[in-house]
Image (cartoon, coloured by chain):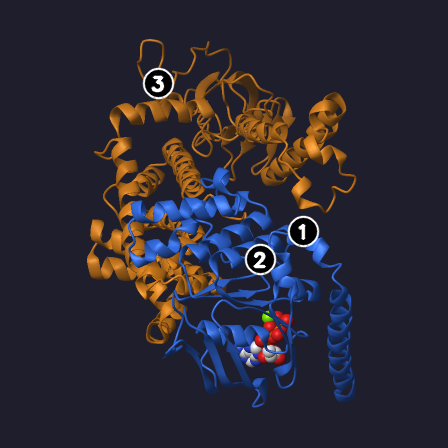
Chain colours: A blue, B orange
Amino acid sequence: MSGLLIDDISMRFDLPNGGHVQALKNVTLDIKSGELMSVLGPSGCGKTTLLNIVAGFLAPTQGRVMLGDHEVKGPDAERGMVFQQGALFEWMNVRDNVRFGPDMKGVSRSQSREKVEHLLEVVGLQDFKEKAIYELSGGMQQRVALARCLANDPDVILMDEPLGALDALTREKMQSLVLDLWKETGKTIILITHSVEEALLLGERLLVMAPRPGRVHKEYRLPFADLGVGNDLREVKKHPDYNSTREEILEMIWNMEEEIMGRAEEQA
Amino acid sequence: MTGFLVLALYVGAFFGSYFVLSRLLQGAFARKGFNKLKTVTFGDESAVVANRIASVLSVVTVFWLWVAFTNSVIPLPKLPGPYQGQMEFTYTATLPDGSTDDATVTMLVYPEDIQQTVDAEGNPGRAPEAVEVEPGEGFAKNDSDTVARYGFKVLNVWKNDDVSKKDGSVVTHINGAPVSPGDYVEVPEGTIGITDKGTPTFAPAVGLRMARLYLPAPEVVLERFVRLNKEGYQNFTLWEHTRYSLQRVLLGFLFGALIGIPIGYAMGLTNWSRGWFDPIVEFMRPVPPLALIPLMIIWFGIGELSKVILLFLAALWIMIIAARAGVSGVAITKVHAAYSLGASKWQILTKVIVPNSLPEIFTGARVAMGVCWGTVVAAELVAAEVGLGKMIVVASKFQLTDIVIVGIILIGVIGFMIDVGMRKLENWLVPWKGRV
Ligand SMILES: Nc1ncnc2c1ncn2[C@@H]1O[C@H](COP(=O)(O)OP(=O)(O)OP(=O)(O)O)[C@@H](O)[C@H]1O
Ligand SMILES: [Mg+2]
């Protein structure tokens, strides 16, 4: 396994009206192999853009992304994605979705079967493997998305608000699942979220980004993710540092949002 | 006039049956299942379910209107019919010297379609002979003649009289009432007129029903359908007419889809193809296929080729646009997900874009089939040797309205069956449609 180096990345979108948006400016991050980094930040601060660059869907206007010893040039099976919703293939059943990656690589089904069945079991969908995607609830669909990503055995997993569309209870269950999967597989994970709690509970490292231009604002090293594995996440929330960190980050983002709003009002 | 009557009856049936049945069958009109619990239904489209009683009645009403306006044998309420039977009127002839004489005219009114009917032994009907009448007294003699329903007859009442019209005999009264040239006398059985030259005429009352020539009764159409099945028409059996039309549609549609879908995909996937095909597609899209018929006939003659090419063109643009819309309908997250799972471009096309565009393709295919089916009939109307459209147009030239109606019903039923079949296929192949 190899670490991920985001090396002085800037991203500037030219707008049709002649203007431009500086979505990212001089972002540098060194993510070690097996690290789970959660990313927080106000809306529009460039989180998705950063993830798209790491995934290889966008080329940055400056800088580069290195995975191990090679540069990221485009999408590849070594970097798996989990989207918020709507990325599953409705024309396939649950099992075919999960084994999509191995199928694409030409791995024979007899070879991939064991792994696929195991993953279906891990995410608790062994009884639903023949079901169509539209027959599943939102939480089940995200579990399929996780399993599908893992079936490909990527080095890095990129998640853009993977639990954002779920209700609070389902979300908590899924957070435990993500945590357990991370410990079990030891994958490098970048997780974008809007929930400060989620970022705290899941991230070993927590990155707060600031907007205009999108940049790294502050970084935390957190103990909660390790505590959370195999534990009730609610217990973790009783940790003495948990609430203070949460308040601090909430205030930070709150102030950024205020600033954006203020600036918007000035412009208007 | 008749048109307004049809409209009035139809609207009356719509509202009348609703008010009567909704009172009588309150249970059947209540909302069912979950919709029963909805208090807001007006404006909630999902709470609207087709009332099947209304659907049945709608078909029954159209059938009944059909019967009501024809001389059908079906025992349903009908509009007043044309006069048929035997009637008499008298005329009074006056000579130049002032002497007068009365005579009776006996008119036998027979069905206008008697020659198209057959009796119990299967012999075709024949127009009846005029009834025998006594000549009577005086110089004017009693006459007898026949006229078909909806017909008109000029009556040379003098032909058996002692004094001819040339010698000064003038018809001065009808049924005792004085008349002069150009006058009309209405009787319950019809209209007796005097021409400008003084000759009596008789036109039996027509009522409100239509003659067979204009609207044949349902049983006549059914009979014709049975006969067409047995005997065919214009050297081809009914099945052959249908099969040729269907075959043209299927061939044209198949080529249209086979070529149109890849072009549509290409337009959705590469700049060059989009630029290349955009002008043609945008130009050809608004041209109705019917406008191409003359060109097709000039270029390819009236044989199969011109029709298949016409239908190919009719289907082509629709399928191109459907496939292009299918590609643009693919959520970018799905494409990204597939690339991140290691899919190649070819795999993106075959495993993501093609299945994801199937709903759009099917919608396009249904539209294309409908357009093709309409176009083939129109093309056959213009020029063809065989086909349902050809059958209709030839029949209309011979005023065989019943064949025309058989053809129209067949076209409608087949078009409907094609659409039902496509929908079944769609539900089977694209079960996720509308559920994501
Ligand atoms: N393709 C694009 N063209 C122009 N501007 C873009 C494009 N994509 C993103 N942007 C701009 O870049 C900035 C960052 O966008 P991005 O989607 O990365 O934000 P985000 O942090 O993911 O926001 P959210 O939390 O709402 O998802 C925004 O101001 C957005 O308007
Ligand atoms: Mg985003």
Residue A232 numbered mark, or none: 1
Residue B126 numbered mark, or none: 3
Residue A187 numbered mark, or none: none
Q: Amino acid at mark 2?
A: Leu
> Is ligand 1 less than 8 Å from the beta carbon at label 1?
no
Between marks 3 and 2 in the image, the one whose residue lies nearer the viewer: 2
Q: Is residue A219 among the parts visible in the rendering?
A: yes
Give the CA separation, mark 2 to mark 1.
11 Å
In the displayed image of the protein, which residue is found farthest to the bottom? A18
B407 or A25, nearer to the observer: A25
> Is ligand 1 less than 8 Å from the beta carbon at label 3?
no
Q: Chain of mark 1?
A: A
Give the CA separation, mark 1 to mark 3.
99 Å
Q: Amino acid at mark 1?
A: Asp
**Element type where label 2 sits in the image:** helix
Within 10 angstroms of label 2, few (less than 14), some, or many (20 or more) residues?
A: many
Between marks 1 and 3 in the image, the one whose residue lies nearer the viewer: 1
Q: Position of residue B56 (x, y in %)?
A: 58, 27
Which comes before the other along the chain, label 2 or label 1?
A: 2
Give the CA separation, mark 3 to mark 2.
96 Å
Q: Chain of mark 3?
A: B
Q: Which residue is mark 2?
A: A179
Q: Amino acid at mark 3?
A: Arg
Q: Position of residue B126 (x, y in %)?
A: 35, 18
Image-based side of B427 in relation to A243, left or right: left
Q: Name the residue located 76 percent from the left edge and 24 percent from the top edge.
A: B23
Proximity of marks 3 and 2: CB atoms separated by less than 8 Å: no
Ligand 2 position by quadrant: bottom right
If the image is split into quadrants, where does the N terminus of chain A sit? bottom left
